[in-house]
Image (cartoon, coloured by chain):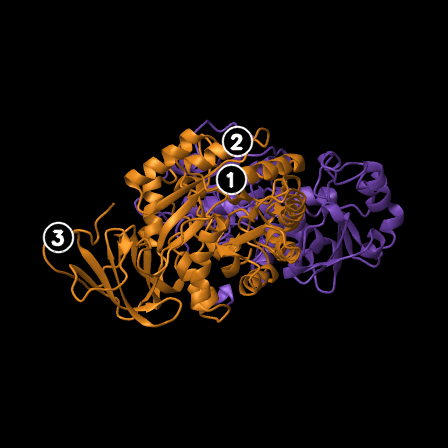
Chain colours: A orange, B purple
């Protein structure tokens, strides 16, 4: 008999009811037994299905100095995530079944959460030849994306959307008109003008949102907009939904927390693409989340080496880490001010992303996989990048005081993260599951 | 939630190019400098100008100082001006030029700069195409850093010489004066430093130029944007014409130089729109017959050559300030002990 773990005195993420939850091996039990080998007292902390991040750069294959599947999934576990979808802009690009299978195998071997590969839309993300969408799906790809390299030619995007329908895969669109972006490095506006940094207008994103809405209408293809950042893009998504098109969109914590003014004090740690926008766009981000225009949240976790980020602004690459601050930024910036309820916020990190990519559902009920997160929604902590599990340390939130802490993460029945302050009672010798690495 | 409500801890080392505002030893930009500091540098520069006009022999004020002039971007005028200024003060001067990608492969900018520091540079004068590069450098090394132009950000010594030239032309006072700045503001570090410096000393700044060359929300820098050059120059006390680069046509920002000249070029007729004692400035080199008509560039209102002469004086004042030997303490003062445990530096 394998050990049974019970989490006692937890608060159900949706109903708020006090509950006990037990799991054995990788599966949640229908009822919690009176006695168990491992007992964890949640002391009223919130229990929810494990978080899912649909937009993560794990940097493998090929860019292990920035992040590895091992370090990136460890960061995910620390952030409360039990599944991530990883982007294919690696070296080489994940554009064939061999690399999809390699990522999955590597994740099974060293990962601390489930890893769902996203494959490229075009070979080498060059925007020229389609990848084998059907084979990629069979190999385990959950979506297609040329993230980081927008598909410039409308005809190519049209063909990709048409063809991806056969595989039933969404195309995740990094929306950016490269001619409008030009040599830009931050949002166009007062701060860029003041610092003399070449700028990117918000329209570089929103014109491509509008284009791909029309292509979704033309093809009936499934479009998911990655990391939307500006008011005009949310308007585009809103209009498309009104028309009943198969489109969805995500946004990221930095877009509702900061504006481009953060560049002046945080430098390259506030450099990502799409860039931080204006205060009007920040407020529009919150509105789009609150009114349901935004379907789910994602981090766009994009680690870089310290040397790469420690350069003059325009010379440094785009990208910040996000897995270990995402939940707290959600609670701090969305829940605490009352823009959305705790349940809705968690839905945007759990059920909603699972639905987007058709991942197996997780409910706090018997028979479902034991993918769980235990959250203290009021605990305060200070962001210290040195403590990150990610190899990436570049974040604009260093030193920021945030509300909401991940106490424990369980993935596939194994504790992948456990706050040191948590009281765990082990009965008998066979309790190695707690704190064990997978 | 306002982002500013968060209690930020101090940024980690190397956090970003713009996180530290000019410290006393650095001159990274004119933005944020107080009026008194600007005036003090100008006053110091006037004394240098007076002395240089009669005595060109070097002083020994920076006898113990090493000045490295690091040009990561092509520069002749500014480099020469800094070299002459440093030599007039008796400093040891070394000039490094590296354009574009000619840094050795794998060597970062930071590595290169630390070499200068290890060579004993007290002051590093740096020009770089990347905005914020001098501020970045100031965080990486212990030397004092002078920004000699960083991309489209600032060119503070140019801004100071513009202030000095205007103060001379205006009989020593800035109050109540207004300047028109005309042309490619978006790509101009000269314009940014001028806007920051002039608005600090109380000069009103009016911009005019093609919409394709005007930065977004530029009014928030402390200036107004006029609908036309004529409007900007009407009753002004000075005009500064900015250089037009031919690349702007290739980038699709301008149709032609001839149209630019017709619409935004400054000719004698437009100069007459300004006040009787108004002057014409240009950071150089002038595209004659494009942004300035030749008779205006060479005319009696032109103070372009005064700008060049003032440039050496301003750079003397800045180097003295940044090397830590204010004139009041007398010449030859070393800054021993600034860097604890650092190598003892012999006289140059």
Between the C-alphas of marks 3 and 2, the distance is 47 Å
Tell whether label 1 touches label 3 (CB within 8 Å): no
Q: Which residue is mark 3?
A: A430
Specify which label sits upstream in the sequence, 3 or 1.
1
In the image, A174: left or right of A55? right
Percent x, y for residue B282? 73, 44
Name the residue located 60 percent from the left edge and 48 percent from the top edge: B156
Q: Which residue is mark 2?
A: A131
Q: Is residue A247 above or below residue B286?
A: below
- Label 3 crowd bin: few (<14), some (14–19), many (20+), radius 10 Å: few
In the image, A75: left or right of B22? left
Percent x, y for residue A437? 23, 47
Name the residue located 21 percent from the left edge and 52 percent from the top edge: A435
Same chain under badges 1 and 2? The reply is: yes
In the image, B150: left or right of A347? right
Q: Is residue A188 above or below residue B127?
A: below
Instruction: Residue lying at the far left in this picture: please name it.
Output: A428
Q: Chain of mark 3?
A: A
Element type at mark 3 = loop
């Amino acid at each position: 008999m394998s050990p049974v773990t019970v989490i006692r005195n937890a608060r159900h993420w949706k109903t708020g009811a006090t509950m006990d939850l037990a799991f054995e091996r990788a599966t949640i039990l229908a009822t919690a037994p009176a006695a168990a080998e491992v007992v964890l007292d949640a002391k009223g902390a919130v229990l929810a299905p494990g978080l899912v991040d649909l937009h993560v750069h794990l940097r493998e294959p090929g860019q292990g100095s920035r992040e590895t599947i091992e370090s990136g999934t460890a960061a995910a576990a620390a952030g409360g995530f039990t599944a991530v979808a990883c982007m294919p802009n690696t070296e080489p690009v994940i554009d064939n079944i061999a690399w999809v299978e390699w990522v999955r195998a590597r994740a099974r071997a060293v990962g601390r959460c489930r890893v769902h590969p996203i494959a490229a839309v075009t070979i080498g993300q060059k925007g020229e030849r389609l990848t084998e969408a059907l084979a990629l799906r069979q190999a385990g790809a959950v979506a297609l994306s040329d993230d980081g390299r927008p598909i410039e030619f409308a005809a190519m995007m049209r063909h990709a959307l048409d063809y991806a329908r056969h595989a039933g895969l969404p195309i995740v669109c990094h929306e950016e008109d490269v001619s409008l972006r030009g040599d830009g490095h931050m949002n166009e506006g007062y701060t860029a003008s003041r610092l003399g940094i070449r700028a990117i207008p918000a329209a570089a994103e929103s014109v491509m949102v509008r284009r791909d809405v029309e292509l979704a209408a033309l093809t009936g293809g499934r479009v998911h907009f990655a990391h939307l950042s500006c008011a005009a893009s949310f308007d585009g998504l809103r209009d498309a939904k009104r028309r009943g098109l198969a489109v969805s969109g995500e946004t990221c914590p930095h877009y509702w927390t900061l504006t481009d003014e953060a560049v002046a004090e945080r430098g390259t740690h506030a450099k990502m693409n799409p860039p931080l926008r204006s205060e009007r766009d920040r407020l529009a981000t919150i509105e789009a989340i609150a009114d349901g225009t935004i379907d789910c949240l994602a981090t766009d976790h994009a680690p870089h080496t310290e040397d790469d980020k420690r350069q003059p602004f325009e010379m440094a690459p785009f990208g910040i880490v996000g897995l270990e601050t995402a939940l707290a930024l959600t609670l701090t910036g969305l829940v605490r001010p009352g823009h959305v309820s705790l349940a809705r916020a968690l839905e945007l990190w759990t059920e909603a992303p699972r639905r987007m990519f058709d991942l197996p559902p997780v409910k706090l009920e018997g028979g479902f996989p034991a993918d769980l997160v235990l959250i203290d929604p009021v605990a305060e902590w200070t962001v210290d990048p040195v403590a990150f599990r990610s190899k990436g340390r570049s974040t604009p939130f260093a030193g920021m005081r945030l509300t909401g802490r991940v106490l424990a993460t369980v993935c596939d029945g194994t504790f992948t993260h456990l706050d040191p302050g948590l009281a765990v009672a082990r009965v008998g010798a066979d309790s190695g599951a707690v704190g064990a690495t997978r | 939630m306002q982002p500013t409500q968060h209690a930020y801890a101090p940024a980690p080392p190397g956090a970003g190019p713009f996180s530290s505002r000019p410290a006393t030893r650095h001159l990274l930009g004119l933005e944020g400098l107080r009026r008194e500091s600007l005036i003090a540098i100008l006053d110091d520069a006037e004394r240098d100008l007076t002395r240089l006009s009669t005595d060109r022999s070097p002083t020994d004020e920076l006898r113990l100082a090493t000045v490295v002039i690091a040009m990561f971007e092509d520069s002749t005028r500014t480099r020469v001006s800094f070299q002459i200024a440093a030599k007039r003060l008796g400093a040891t001067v070394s000039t490094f030029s590296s354009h574009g990608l000619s840094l050795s492969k794998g060597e970062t900018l930071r590595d290169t700069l630390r070499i200068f520091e290890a060579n004993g540079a007290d002051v590093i004068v740096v020009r770089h195409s990347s905005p914020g590069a001098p501020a970045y450098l100031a965080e990486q090394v212990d030397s004092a850093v002078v920004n000699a132009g960083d991309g489209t950000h600032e060119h503070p010594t140019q801004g100071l010489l513009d202030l000095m030239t205007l103060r001379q032309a205006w009989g020593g006072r800035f109050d109540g004066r207004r300047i028109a700045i005309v042309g490619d503001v978006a790509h101009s570090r000269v314009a940014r430093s001028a806007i920051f410096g002039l608005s600090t000393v109380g000069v009103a700044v009016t911009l005019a130029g093609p919409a394709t060359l005007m930065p977004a929300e530029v009014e928030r820098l402390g200036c107004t944007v006029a609908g036309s050059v004529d409007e900007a120059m009407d009753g002004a006390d000075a005009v500064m014409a900015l250089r037009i680069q031919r690349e702007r046509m290739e980038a699709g920002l301008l149709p032609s130089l001839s149209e630019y000249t017709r619409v935004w070029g400054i000719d004698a007729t437009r100069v007459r729109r300004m006040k009787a004692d108004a002057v014409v400035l240009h950071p150089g080199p002038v595209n004659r017959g494009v942004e300035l008509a030749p008779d205006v560039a060479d005319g009696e209102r032109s103070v372009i050559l005064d700008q060049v002469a003032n440039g050496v004086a301003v750079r003397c004042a800045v180097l003295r300030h940044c090397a830590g030997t204010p004139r009041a303490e007398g010449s030859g003062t070393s800054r021993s002990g600034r860097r604890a445990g650092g190598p003892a530096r012999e006289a140059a």
